[in-house]
């Protein structure tokens, strides 16, 4: 199966995207390649998508920069494709309270 088809299935079946959402793909330097592949696929599929690249955090739970946290909050759907988890960060919790859908 082509990568773009996998991303399409993910958006339809896992995220239940409607197609009109603003999507942010957040990646760090360690996961930049896969993040860009997801971003490119989403763009090809017609989603309004931004790509955000940040330095790799030193451990899971380390907060992202405030500019990144603001982009996370502005998204309807946010994919965090990072070496270390952002699940337990204040930035993720704040974004989750404002976004319609979330994926890590």
Image: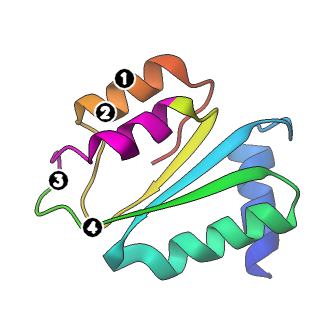
Task: Give the total of numbered labels.
Answer: 4
| Contact? badges 4 and 1 (CB < 8 Å) | no
| Contact? badges 1 and 3 (CB < 8 Å) | no
Image quadrant for the N terminus? bottom right
Gap between marks 2 and 4 measured at Cα: 16 Å
Q: Mark 2 points at which residue?
A: 91
Side of 41 where 67 appears, left or right: left
> Mark 1 or mark 3, which is nearer to you?
1
The picture quadrant where one finds residue 54 is: bottom left
* Label 3: how many Cα within 10 Å (few below 14, some 14–19, many 20+): some
Instruction: Please report whichever mark, 3 or 4, sits nearer to the chain's N-terminal start.
Output: 4
| Contact? badges 2 and 4 (CB < 8 Å) | no
Q: Mark 1 points at which residue?
A: 94
| Contact? badges 2 and 1 (CB < 8 Å) | yes
> Mark 4 or mark 1, which is nearer to you?
4
Q: Which residue lies furthest to the left in this view?
A: 58
The residue that appears at 85% across and 68% down in the rendered structure is 44
Q: Which residue lies furthest to the front in this view?
A: 67
Q: Mark 3 points at which residue?
A: 60
Magenta residues, start to end: 60-73
* Label 4: how many Cα within 10 Å (few below 14, some 14–19, many 20+): few
What is the x, y in percent for residue 43?
Answer: 79, 63
């Amino acid at each position: 199966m082509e990568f773009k088809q996998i991303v399409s299935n993910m958006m339809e079946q896992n995220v239940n995207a409607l197609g009109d959402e603003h999507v942010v793909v957040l990646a760090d330097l360690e996961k930049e390649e896969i993040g860009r592949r997801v971003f490119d696929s989403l763009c090809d599929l017609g989603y309004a998508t931004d790509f955000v690249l940040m330095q790799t955090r030193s451990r899971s739970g380390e907060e992202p920069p405030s500019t990144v946290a603001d982009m996370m909050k502005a998204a309807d759907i946010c994919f965090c494709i990072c070496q270390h988890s952002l699940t337990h960060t204040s930035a993720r919790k704040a974004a989750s309270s404002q976004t319609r859908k979330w994926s890590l």
